Amino acid sequence: MAGAAASERKHGLSAFGDLAYPADFEHFAYADPDAPKGGTFSLVGWGGVTTFNSLNNYILKGDAAQGLELLFDSLMTRAADEPDALYSLVAESAEVADDGMSVTFYLRPEAKFSDGTPLTAEDVAFSFDTLKEKGHPIYHQMLQDVVSAETLDPATVRYTFKGELVRDLPLIVAGLPIFSKAYYTKKPFDQTTLEAPLGSGPYLVDRMAQGRTIVYRRNPDYWAKDLPANRGRWNFDRIRYEYFRDRTAGMEAFKAGFYDFREEFTSKVWATEYDFPAIRDGRVKKEVLLDETPSGTQGFFLNTRRDHLKDPRVRKALDLAFDFEWTNRNVFYGLYQRTESFFENSPMKAEGEPSEAEKALLGELGVPVAEETLGAVYLPPKSDGSGADRKLLLEAGKLLDEAGWTIKNGMRVNDKGEPFELEILTFEPSFERLTAPYVKNLKLLGIDARIRMVDPAQYQQRLKNFDFDVTTERYVMRNTPGVELRSYFGSDAAAIDGSLNLAGISDPAVDALIERILSAKSRDELETAACALDRVLRNGHYWVPHWYKASHHVAHWDKYARPETKPRFDRGILDTWWYDEAKAATLASNVVASSEAEAPSNSRRQLFIIAGLIGLVLAGYLFVRLRRPAKKQ
């Protein structure tokens, strides 16, 4: 890990040693230390999930509720206005060894769990061991180079590393949730449960209805509420997550005032449905918040484990068949841009010809790199916007011919006469309007393509088992990408059930470049390696890239206030906004006036709420255990 030449205790950590806040900082610049506490914040959540059956967010089993991270503290906490910096929380300071092969954390003596029991180094070490041995497989992969967590005394814990790629490991272990050893000695960690777990974070589980709603209440005795990293944060007395089976029911419930905040991921809804009376008279605020983070990697991911999708020519043909320009104009109301890169909206996006540094890196990997990768980076096609660009479809047909899939009686078949069948797996009815035009073009190529709509639980299970041809996914990309890249794109992850490598990518060049990213000693080195990885991935045609927007579309009932400064790399909503009693009183009086002026609206409101509750009862899907973001459509 880059940083000071000699080992020293510091109040924060970052990948390359740079920290924006001094040791005596009073609060994060994007938090208001005078923010009042109180009120409730209710939302659907941005996880794109529709149900839950567990309060264990850290194992493969079950579908965990959103917001469980509010229950647990970590050794250090992230600064959302820096690319990767973490600052002291449970740990007062940290000391990275001169050789980077270990990090020692010095815990605050006042740290405690919500039941009043002390939080000690023994709990920290237990949490590491438990996550690595019994947690979700992704934790085992993330922590594979962390050898041990050793308790030196009740307030000191040392993590020891192995290998050469240790730069990010202090950050990873500093951000792990901390569990109570005493609690989990009596409770099985590796089982789903609906019992509220014991934590040390700012919130507690207040109440829940399985699959429908969960409410967290602020812990007034939270031990860390006055620490600099928490001043002005965690202001709501209660945070309530609501669950709906589909977006339509959720939208109608929002309009009826059943919950207060909504981020909109559906362009058609944003363009056409946010003009209801409460918007027009100002009771609901509609806003666009700048998003400076990498936009996320969303697309139709092609499962290369399937024999008919192993040939990159076939996969490129599938890319050529998707008409983004038509989709953006006719479905998205022009709100999106085409995603070109796995690192879109960031300096890690490859552009044009490779730089000299990229060429040098690709040339010294010691593994084969496709010749095309050394030229101009692959760009997805730009169509004529007709919906079925003849030129692009002809090009796609030629690629399929070259790959051995020829036309016979109007259908694509291989040399055995087997038809080219392609199933696009989904559980969201709202995605059909996006997928159906694509399927139409695939059929024009002679492919027997179809949409396979399954219930959310079946969808989840089929993804875990990689039982699909094509599915839609969106990966979160960090400003400083790290070991998660192994799970997204690494060869080892391709063989692990439940991993995030949905495309089954298994390429030595990809593996080597991921390791170069992990071992980068400066941000310039990291960006060079990420650009090179982007080139290799794009040349592999593992996906049909979708779309993005560098902003968040949000709407909320006008009862909240917020700091003047928004954190650069986060929404900053749950932790820095607050309930404004004056606004809430004004809103309440306006709602009464509106109800009297529009008497029929009360009955409509009841219908909307009933529709929402029906949606909640029918819900069945969740992937929040890995904090998967909602797909943008």
Image (spheres, helix red, strand yellow):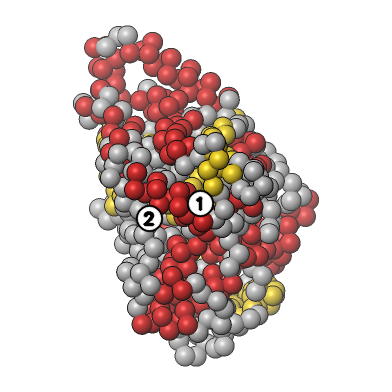
Confirm whether residue 402 shows in the render: yes
Looking at this view, is 278 or 208 the one in front? Answer: 278
Residue 621 visible here = no
Mark 1 in CB contact with mark 2 (< 8 angstroms): no
Residue 253 pos. (x, y %) = 42, 25
Between residue 405 and residue 570, name the one nearer to us.
405
Would residue 246 be found to the left or right of residue 144 on screen? left
**Image coordinates for residue 464, horizontal then vertical, percent:** 65, 47
User: How far across and how far down the image is residue 557, in percent?
Assistant: 32, 32
Quarter of the image where the C terminus is located: top left
Residue at point 63%, 81% (across, down) = 163
Tag 1 secondary structure: helix
Give, as a three-letter code, the residue at label 1.
Leu
Q: Return the disc, 1 or 2, that comes first in the chain's sequence.
A: 2
Instruction: Give the answer, above or below, for where 616 lies relative to 391.
Output: above
Residue designated by label 2:
380
In this view, the mark in front (1 or 2): 1
Instruction: Determine the residue positioned at 58% across, 61% down.
Output: 505
270 relative position to 451: left or right: left
Residue 400 image label: 1
SS assignment at label 2: loop
Q: Is residue 176 above or below residue 218?
A: below
